[in-house]
Amino acid sequence: MNSNLNHPGRVFASRLYESVQDLQQMLDLLMQARAQTSDWRYAHVGELLFNFFMVACHLNPQEHIRLWFHEQQMVGFAMLAEDPNFDFQVLPAYEWQGIETEAWLWAKNRIAELRKLDEKRWREPCVSGARQDNPQRMAFLEQCGFRQGGQFSEVNMIRSLEEPIPDVEIPAGCQVRSMGGAEDLNNRAEAQRQVWHPWTVGDVSDENYAYFMTLPGYDLDLDVVGVASDGVIASYVNGWIDPVNRIGDLGPLGAREAYRRRGLTRAVLTECLRRMKAHGMNRVCVSTTVTNTPARRLYESIGFQIVNQYLEFIHSE
């Protein structure tokens, strides 16, 4: 591995993100990389899409995403999100040849610029992460001044869709269905806001969610909602598919506090699993924080098993 900050290795063309065509190439990169490695070496396209959405809502993708190319092919990208959070993904054949080093130097300089503009908003230490079975990525982060820690490490879980999907009784007067489109927009966005307030994930306007629905990879059929008898969208899950590797991803998901423990979250999850199977997926993954025991038990109760762990790393300022 060439991760010495003073020896960047090969020279690659790079530029900032420009348009949705770049986003599609980023998605293709992740699917291609997973096909060449394993289910856990790279992020799922669903993770990328939601993280991109958060950057589009609160920042500017054209200032917070950088891309690397070799002979017109996108071979790597980096994203700097709020908090600040730094992520980078590089195709296997191009790893540890200098892109990772350039990505971190770009992110570090960008953070310094942002702190000059708004010290309060960007004052927290930068965070990044690596899965526990990726020692090269962990070593690189440590060389860059990151140390393992923080409160948002996750367990990664997976479930085969070859196994039976349990039937779940839907509470009387309630229904589980697809998000209905424009007529459901305020109801759906309000559910997102209530579930995740005051976190950034919940800082989503109706207009933001309408934009989200236009992104490549978003499928109305996989935006599954549980509607209570009073018409309120009480629970929901966003489902995502990787058609190249036939693996789905769940998230985010949740239920409004007043409607919890009624079985609607379990109902939307199992319905989304059935729909992913209908879309040709043969397995589904989901992640939750290590400390979120109720969520882990819910996933385990419908057939998910822990197979990996995503470790948070915090930069030593």
Image (spheres, rainbow, N blue to C red):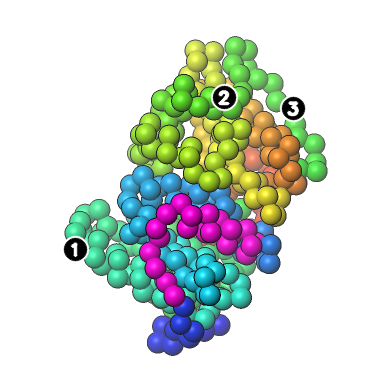
Give whichever of discs 1 and 2 has the lower sequence position: 1
Cβ–Cβ below 8 Å for labels 1 and 2?
no
Q: Which residue is mark 3?
A: 167
- Extreme front residue here? 72
Q: Whole-percent x and y of residue 130?
A: 53, 65
Check disc 2 and give the amino acid type.
Gly
Q: Which label was assigned to residue 226?
A: 2
Magenta part of the protein: which range?
Answer: 13-34
Which residue is denoted by mark 1 in the rendering?
A: 116
SS for dot 3: loop
Give the residue at x 44% y 66%. Answer: 67
Q: Is residue 265 visible?
A: no
How far from the left and from the top, in percent, is residue 7? 44, 87
Q: Nearer the viewer, residue 141 or 179?
A: 179
Residue 212 image offset from top left, x and y in percent: 45, 40
**Residue sitting farthest toward the bottom:** 7
Amino acid type, mark 3: Asp
